[in-house]
Image (spheres, rainbow, N blue to C red):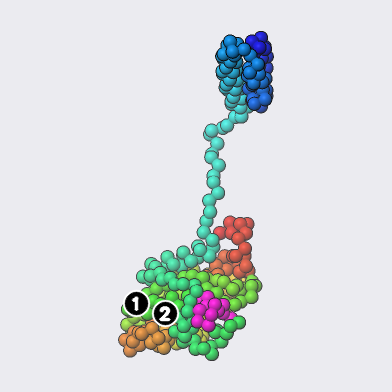
Amino acid sequence: MKKQLEEISASAKAEISAVTDEASLRNVQVSYLGKKGKLTAILRGMGALSAEERPLIGALANEIRVDLEETIKLKLDSLKAAELENRLKNEKIDVTLPARSKSTGRFHPLSQVENELTEIFVGMGFEIAEGPEVELSYNNFDALNAPADHPSRDFQDTFYISPEVLLRTQTSPVQIRAMKGKTPPIRIISPGRVYRFDEVDATHSPMFHQLEGLVVGKGITMGDLKGTLAMFAKAYFGEETKTRFRPHNFPFTEPSAEVDVSCFVCGGKGCRLCKGEGWIEILGAGMVHPRVLENCGIDTDVYSGFAFGVGLERIVMIKYGIDDMRYLYENDLRFLSQF
């Protein structure tokens, strides 16, 4: 058995010396030192030896095992060093080349516009107010002077969770909460998501975004509203921008108006963007209806106010010349990477 062990040692070292890659070296290791390896088989047969031979052969076998393990480790180190040297020779790197830039994300165009508008109004002294998207129908309709028979309360137009709870159709309930919770003067904007039962098409979506504003105080007039919106229009669309107010009807404001701005592309001369009219409708506004103020516990003999609301999708589409609202929600990077 001693001769067998010496032959196994010599054979293993010869094979280790001959291998040229790590995989072959692992195969040699398993062949000799694995559970079914040649050296292991010798050790399992030691039971047939005499009591005098067993410790001698055992010591020799362990000595050979340690020797082979060390030989394999040295060979492995040699192979790895050779592989590294080969890679250094064949894989050249020009360290003077500029590093590869990482692709970074950016704000969605809707978020961009919301941030831009918010910055303008905050600079004008407005505070940001937020409220729940699941709202009481009272705050969404009744408090805003839209009684139970108002068309906007039709079950075909609004997502009702129960007769008293719904998904807000506008961010105006935030204004109701602000007026109930604060003492005038109040100057807030309320950006956020709103929901209406609209079919999806190029200009409609059951979910969209609004930014509304509210000012309540002593002596607030229509002139303050016009001045505020004129300043906003100039800040966002350009210093040469003009504003135009057209009479309209909203249940929560009186008087009410649709607000247009002179086309920022053609300067009011008429082009494709403004459809030859020279004006672009951007938002609705008006003086807060006295009944709305009274519903919030505000004395209309002392205070008055104005409110306005703009659809963010509309501003995005106007600003970037987008003709289909659905592009904003499809998460197509080919589209979004343009902004």
Closer to the chain start, of discs 2 and 1, is: 2
> Residue 268's x, y, as percent?
54, 74
Give the SS element for disc 2.
helix
Instruction: Judge from the rendering whether residue 100 lies leftward or rightward of residue 20; answer left or right.
Output: left
Report if residue 71 is visible in the image.
no
Disc number placed over residue 182 in the picture, else none: 1
Q: Is residue 115 above or below residue 12?
A: below
> Residue 241's x, y, as percent?
48, 72
> Residue 205's x, y, as percent?
60, 72
Q: Nearer the viewer, residue 313 or 246?
A: 313
- Which amino acid, by three-letter code, is at mark 2? Ile
Instruction: Judge from the rendering whether residue 226 lies leftward or rightward of residue 30; answer left or right.
Output: left
> Residue 301's x, y, as percent?
33, 89
The residue that mark 2 highlights is 176
Residue 235 lies in what quarter of the image? Answer: bottom left
Pick the quarter of the image with the N terminus.
top right
Magenta residue check for 20: no
Binning the other alpha carbons within 10 Å of mark 1 as few (below 14), some (14 to 19) or many (20 upward) gives: few
Q: Are marks 2 and 1 in contact (CB under 8 Å)?
A: no
Residue at position x 49%, y 86% in the image:
146
Give the SS element for disc 1.
loop
Write down the region rendered in magenta.
Answer: 157-168
